Amino acid sequence: MSEKEAVTKPGIKTWIIVLALIFPPIFFFLNMPLHSMTQWWVWPAWFPIHFFWFLLLFHYLGKISPKLKLGPTEVVLILTIFYLVSGKEYLYEGIHDWTEFPLWTFNSGLFYYGAYNPTSSDVFWSKVPSFLLPARTALKAFYEGGLFDLGAWLAPALFWTLWSIAVFAGGMFWAYILRKPLVEVERVPFPFSAPAAYMIKYYYEGEEKGGLTARTLFNLKTKTGKILWLGFIVGFIMLMPASFQAFLPIPLPTYLQVLPIYDWFMPIVEKILPGAYVGGWFPPIDILILLLVPTDILLTGTLYYIIFGIIYPVIGVAAGILPWSPGYDPNEYATYVGPWNSGWFGMVGISVGLGIWVVWNYRSHFAKVLSSLTSKEKLEDEGMPYSWIAIGSVATFVLLLVLWIAAGGNPILGLIGIIFYIVFLYGWVYESAIAYPTSVTNTPYGIPLFYTIGNALGQWGPWPDQRSFMDVALFWTLGGPGSRQSAFQMHSQFLLYGVGRENKVRARDILIVSVITMISIAFTVQFLTPWWYTVFGGKNNLGAVDYNEWSFGDAWNYSYGTPAGSIPSQLMIILYVILGIVTTFVMFILRARFAWFPLHPVGIAMVTTWGITHGTLFTVAFIIKYLFLKLGGSRSVEEIGIPLAVGATIGAGTAYGLACVLAFITRAIPVFLTHL
């Protein structure tokens, strides 16, 4: 059966479109009390709970009446809507993390905070166009509480709504161009789509007996069912202590799903191997999903981590090249201390290299899509005409550039900045589809490159230079650092095509529903957020994901601050980028020429997110996968690893969901009532 024949016919029904439009504001009102009036980093949201429980609901509704039965298309599109508002981890763990709420902190929040902050307010009020900011009194009420003035917020809310749509709905179109070559030609594995994809697949597949279907998802008599529910128990036990610990008067881990192995092991490691780094980001559930990542990527990441996370720093400390004392954070060697910053090479150099490789490798497909604007040839990608893809891509690109210029930015730098942003994210679209959709780094690390480009073009001098103020700020708002974890960023939304492929749902339907949901998210967040914080006592007195404040210096310091010191020099950044591009192309060329060549540049990028903090995670995953393959062969990953991972994510998401519902009832509602 061909790929085209294997895909179901379009199935977007009117009620799906309505749900895509109304669910973002429903999500806002249901979850904002929990998000803004409790510990948002512990409980960002409580609804929707893990999607498994909706499948169970659909199952029993179908028993009540055949008219209530849902097909794979409807189910996948409902998941699409839930995922986009809930954050990237909802797809593979059922956990809310960076939901729709922080959208304003990715863009408008930088300008709101800059105009409110006493240190920078004079500059912002004098240099920023008035339609990007509300009146001073309205902004003060937003932070400190007061009466909400809708008229004062209309212009900035509308501007930033259009900006959000251009960046994120545009990203969905820009990434869709890659769908056919990556999904159908290269057949990328989509490891972190697998938990949701197979959960839905197990829901529809099963054993036929007596005219009835025993669905695999609920069938404990099958081998797959047994392993899946064993995984459920494992996942529930793993996350239950951390989830319910939040209700006890004891310290919380930074993130519920992450083990603090750095605190456990570094005091021991630094006595044996001074300078070595062990720890970082270590969610145990992710290890099971990482079994689905290609072995060569895990191997490459493991080797890179051992060399630059252990061997290099230990030798450097012993030789006196690298500074060290008990308690020193060795991750600094990867970011800005010492002669070789392995994190910058991977985070920026390899990521840019992968983005350029993607564009170069699929250049003929890009040309074919864009030429459809004038061509009479009718081509489509799973029901989506190439001309529609091209129109959506070009229209959002132009809209974003027009908004950049209207805000006072340099047209040439706006053009360069947007292109650079897209190419950078193309690298992470590829990385996420083939390996791990981790916390993609974008503008915090892209700003030095963007600044260097402006310097080379004679727009400003060495940093800091006040002439760079508006363009650097606008580049930051292409997707602030927090957007790396959102579900509607290019690389995260692209994962949905893995769910669609496994369940034979047309990508066209996923794209359309994604764009509609994103438009609703933009209007919801940009208009309702100022109202919410103003009428409920001010943001200073409530809670929020304050990316706009935490990362304010990423943009401000290049014009009025002092960025040098926490990042490499401009020259070193350029060298890392050049070396990263060369390394990426050389590795791909060697892989194409020699089947035995074992290294893959994605492994370097995955390990070096935020320094080299993912090294331990990838090393442990590689060891476990090696044992899987050694003891059970390649089929063991499919027959045991996948159902085990699916079950574990359901169990972990269930434990987390129960804690969130309990927090909403016992903590959010009482606080909310006091503000009425």
Image (cartoon, helix red, strand yellow):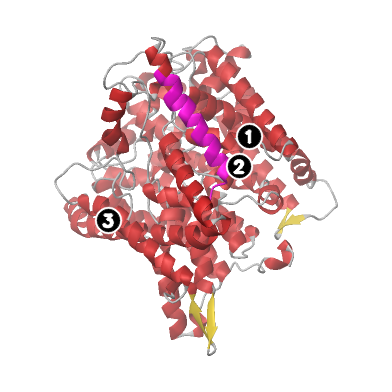
Rendering coords of residue 492 (x, y %): 52, 47
Q: Could you tell me if the residues under marks 2 and 1 are in contact, i.e. CB atoms within 8 Å?
A: yes
Q: Is residue 530 above or below residue 463?
A: below
Extreme-front residue of the structure: 631
Q: Could you tell me if the residues under marks 2 and 3 are in contact, i.e. CB atoms within 8 Å?
A: no
Which structural element holds mark 2? helix
Type of amino acid at the residue the image marks with label 1 = Gly
Q: Could you tell me if the residues under marks 1 and 3 are in contact, i.e. CB atoms within 8 Å?
A: no
| Residue pointed to by mark 1 | 355
Judged by its main secondary structure, the magenta piece is helix
If you read the primary sequence from the N terminus, does the residue marked by circle 1 or circle 3 appear first? 3
Which structural element holds mark 1? helix
Q: Is residue 561 visible?
A: no
Q: Residues within 10 Å of mark 3 (few under 14, many from 20)?
A: many
Q: Is residue 11 above or below residue 286?
A: below
The residues bearing labels 2 and 3 have C-alpha atoms spaced at a distance of 33 Å
| Residue pointed to by mark 3 | 240
Rendering coords of residue 58 (x, y %): 45, 74
Rendering coords of residue 91 (x, y %): 46, 55
Q: Nearer the viewer, mark 2 or mark 3?
A: 3
Q: Is residue 450 left or right of residue 275?
A: right
The residues bearing labels 2 and 1 have C-alpha atoms spaced at a distance of 8 Å
If you read the primary sequence from the N terminus, does the residue marked by circle 2 or circle 1 appear first? 1
